Amino acid sequence: MSNVVELYGWSAQPRSTAMVLQGMDKIRDSIPHNVSDIPIPSTLLATSVLDYAKKELSLPTFNHSMRVYFYGKAMHLDQFPDWRFSDETYLLACLLHDIGTTTKNLTETLMSFEFYGGMLALDLLKKLQAPIQQAESVAEAIMRHQDLGETGTITTIGFLIQLATIF
């Protein structure tokens, strides 16, 4: 995947879940997945953000973030195998999608946790020298992960996080 739009999950998807599923007679049969069968990216960037998330998030929120990763990857593999993005980018978005909900971060601003969390994630990923297109993709997915609706579009990464958190 050399195309940054695909690599970092920028491809547009309809924001409407009903529209994405439109035309499907049924959701494809799912295959049971063991967590151990879904690899966690082990790049320096991924492990740095994993360590950061373990340190900053409460244990329940960290576990939720990992569930979002595994649920989303299972949905990707079974229901949307044609969607293209790097697992690393999706993992980063999952690990950081609720960073704005920490006690410290909730009291630092009057902004919504989604927007503040997106800004925090963007700053962190820049400091860790992530490619700007990847950092911005993660930030946008975080800012919009609760932006459910029926009109417009959302990025692939953003939509998958929405699906993994609402189902």
Image (tube, rainbow, N blue to C red):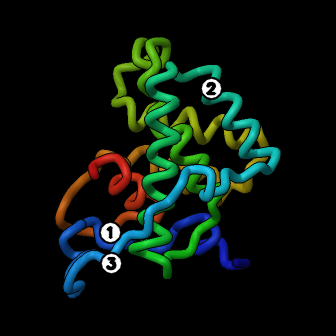
Q: Circle 2 sits on which residue?
A: 54
Q: Is residue 69 left or right of residue 134?
A: left
Q: Name the secondary structure under disc 2.
A: helix
Amino acid marked by disc 3: Arg
Is 9 in front, or is 107?
Answer: 9
Q: Residue shown at 43%/75% (left/top)?
A: 80
Callout 1: few (<14), some (14-19), or many (20+) C-alpha neighbours within 10 Å?
some
| Position of the N terminus by quadrant | bottom right
Is 38 in front, or is 130?
Answer: 38
Q: Is residue 36 left or right of residue 101?
A: right
Q: Residue shown at 71%/42% (left/top)?
A: 126
Q: What is the x, y in percent for residue 160?
A: 41, 60
Callout 2: few (<14), some (14-19), or many (20+) C-alpha neighbours within 10 Å?
some
Is 114 in front, or is 109?
Answer: 114
Q: Residue shown at 60%/41% (left/top)?
A: 122
Q: Circle 1 sits on which residue?
A: 153
Q: CA distance from mark 2 to mark 1?
A: 32 Å
Q: Circle 3 sits on which residue?
A: 28
Q: Name the secondary structure under disc 1.
A: strand
Q: Is residue 120 left or right of residue 31?
A: right
Q: CA distance from mark 2 to mark 3?
A: 34 Å
Query: Vertically, is 4 above or below 23?
Result: above
Q: Residue shown at 75%/40% (left/top)?
A: 47
